[in-house]
């Protein structure tokens, strides 16, 4: 336990500046959205209290907005508002509306009618009754709604990192992808403390006298305005803005390798791989961390940069399966390996293109492939024994898991279940180790660098030789984890840096070395 806290303290001390920077971004997103919600919901709640017949449909609509998953709502806003601050603030604004609106309406509606009649009898105008009687009496309920909205927004704002808006979610998602609990806590602890602190401040603000709180009002406006300055931190000195996935950012064969081998310092935002291709196509990003067989590279007229110094090792795709299944059900190995050699780089790119660009269902694409290659068989009658196939959260993995599921159903009586979209490497690997799944498609380079993490000496001996890398991970996984790498499928899906073709031609950037020189020269101008 002491070692854990020591490592956690070390992580915080090493990343204090970055945590502070992302905390400011997080506060900015939260404050702007909260201020906008108060600005809209407070007068609307007052209006509904005066016209109660309109309240049910409007409150119902606000309630419906709350039921939409936040990550889905963020995704829906990207075609309209792009990536970054604007969609994040708008989604948080929608999420904060309901508690403030409902509590404002409820608080004012519950003010005793006799109190309002007495105020009118004393000669007050309706506005004076609202300002000096109704609002002061409703303040505890209104502030309860604001406090709820604030805590909700601090939590939901962590998801903003998936669309390049920054914030503490960068640490959380990076930690999940890399199975780094210190990185996860580097985002989670400040976010939790921020929610507690803001809730405490608002609990004290409940007791302010409205007539004497103009300075507080203008102070909130100033804070909202200043927080807008922290849209997204721009790290580095180049003019190119890159989108990096959380996993790529923290890997030796990712941004860490680019910095150490190429001395490449990028302006970057952390972004989900589900939306980064669209972001670069639409011009929101200039460079992304892509995958060499991704169909969107072709669909969106993008190009990959040449890796001159070979920081990206071989990434042969191969099934990774629990050893106990190979022993318990030997025929399974033969069935799964029947796919070996059937999919090369160009075929996999085409299959990805069908899903990414033509928007076909991965199961449909898998079925068509099997039929073309005479591998499809009608499913046999299922037995009671379950075999669970997992996958990561990008189209290629969905396609491969569907292909394997169909092969096994057509040749065995196993009850095949697919658990797709399990997230990054560590999520799938841990699920396999702990028998939550029985198999998933993996890549030899990922197994080598992310899970095994060998010494520089071992990496030098392997020398990026595909067969040596495969043999090494096969032996190590069998000995350490009781997991089997079966024969490679036939294609290599490595990490790559991707730019728009027009920009590549315009700036004459064709390799990562060219990119590093361009950024360095741009910084000197």
Image: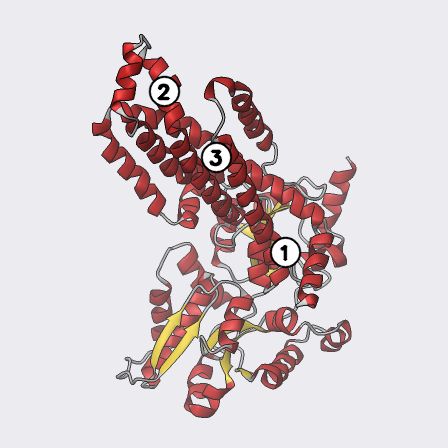
Quadrant location of the N terminus? bottom right
Name the spot of residue 342 as percent of width and height, x first.
46, 76
Nearer the viewer's eye, disc 2 or disc 3? 2
Q: Secondary structure at mark 1?
A: helix
Q: Is residue 379 left or right of residue 458?
A: left
| Residue that numbered label 2 is attached to | 133
Does any portion of residue 232 appear in the rendered image? no
Name the spot of residue 43 as percent of width and height, x first.
37, 24
Name the spot of residue 361 as percent of width and height, x first.
35, 61
* Distance in Å between CA atoms under marks 2 and 3: 28 Å
Does any portion of residue 25 appear in the rendered image? yes
* Distance in Å between CA atoms under marks 3 and 1: 28 Å
Q: Secondary structure at mark 2?
A: helix
| Residue that numbered label 1 is attached to | 249
Front residue (pair 125, 470): 125
Q: Nearer the N terminus, badge 2 or badge 3?
A: 3
| Residue that numbered label 3 is attached to | 33
Front residue (pair 408, 134): 134
Nearer the viewer's eye, disc 2 or disc 1? 2
Q: Looking at the image, which residue is at 35% across and 34% down?
A: 103
Q: Nearer the N terminus, badge 3 or badge 1?
A: 3
Q: Secondary structure at mark 3?
A: helix
Name the spot of residue 478 as percent of width and height, x first.
59, 85
Nearer the viewer's eye, disc 3 or disc 1? 3
Quadrant location of the C terminus? top right
Label 2 Cα neighbours within 10 Å, binned few <14 / some 14-19 / many ≥20: some
């Amino acid at each position: 336990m002491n070692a854990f806290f020591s490592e956690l303290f070390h992580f915080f001390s090493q990343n204090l500046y970055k945590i502070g920077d992302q905390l400011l971004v997080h506060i900015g997103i939260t404050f702007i959205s909260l201020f906008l919600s108060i600005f809209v919901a407070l007068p609307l709640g007052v209006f509904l209290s005066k016209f109660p017949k309109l309240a049910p449909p409007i409150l119902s609509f606000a309630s419906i907005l709350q039921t939409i998953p936040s990550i889905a709502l963020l995704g829906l806003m990207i075609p309209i508002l792009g990536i970054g601050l604007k969609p994040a603030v708008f989604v948080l604004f929608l999420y904060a509306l309901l508690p403030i609106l409902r509590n404002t309406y409820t608080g004012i509606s519950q003010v005793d009618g006799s109190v309002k009649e007495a105020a009118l009898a004393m000669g007050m105008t309706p506005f004076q009754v609202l300002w000096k009687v109704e609002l002061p009496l409703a303040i505890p309920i209104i502030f309860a709604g604001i406090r709820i909205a604030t805590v909700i927004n601090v939590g939901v704002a962590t998801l903003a990192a998936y669309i390049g808006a920054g914030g503490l979610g960068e640490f959380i998602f990076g930690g999940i992808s890399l199975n780094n609990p210190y990185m996860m806590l580097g985002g989670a602890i400040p976010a939790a403390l921020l929610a507690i602190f803001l809730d405490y401040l608002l609990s004290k603000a409940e007791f302010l006298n409205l007539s004497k709180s103009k300075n507080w009002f203008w102070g909130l406006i100033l804070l909202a305005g200043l927080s807008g300055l922290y849209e997204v931190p721009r790290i580095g000195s180049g003019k190119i803005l890159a989108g990096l996935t959380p996993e790529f950012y923290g890997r030796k064969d990712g941004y860490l390798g680019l910095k150490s081998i190429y001395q490449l310092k990028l302006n970057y935002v952390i972004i989900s791989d589900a939306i980064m291709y669209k972001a670069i196509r639409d011009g929101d990003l200039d460079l992304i961390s892509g995958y060499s067989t991704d169909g969107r590279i072709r669909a969106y007229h993008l190009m990959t940069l040449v890796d001159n110094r070979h920081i990206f090792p071989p990434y042969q795709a191969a099934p990774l399966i629990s050893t106990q299944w190979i022993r318990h059900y030997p025929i399974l190995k033969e069935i799964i390996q029947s796919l070996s050699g059937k999919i090369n780089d160009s075929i996999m790119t085409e299959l990805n293109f069908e899903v990414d660009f033509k928007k076909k269902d991965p199961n449909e694409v898998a079925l068509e492939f099997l039929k073309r290659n005479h591998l499809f068989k009608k499913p046999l009658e299922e037995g009671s024994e379950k075999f669970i196939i997992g996958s990561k959260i990008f189209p290629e993995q969905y396609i491969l898991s569907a292909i394997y599921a169909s092969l096994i159903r057509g040749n065995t009586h196993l009850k095949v279940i697919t658990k797709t979209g399990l997230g990054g490497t560590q999520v799938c690997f841990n699920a396999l180790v702990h028998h939550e799944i029985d198999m998933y498609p993996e890549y030899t380079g990922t197994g080598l660098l992310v899970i095994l993490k060998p010494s520089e000496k071992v990496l030098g001996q392997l020398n990026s030789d595909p067969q040596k890398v495969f043999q090494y991970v096969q032996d190590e996984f069998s000995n350490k984890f009781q997991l089997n790498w079966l024969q490679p499928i036939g294609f290599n899906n490595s990490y790559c840096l991707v730019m728009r073709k027009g920009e590549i031609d315009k700036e004459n950037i064709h390799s990562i070395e060219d990119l590093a020189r361009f950024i360095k020269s741009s910084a000197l101008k």
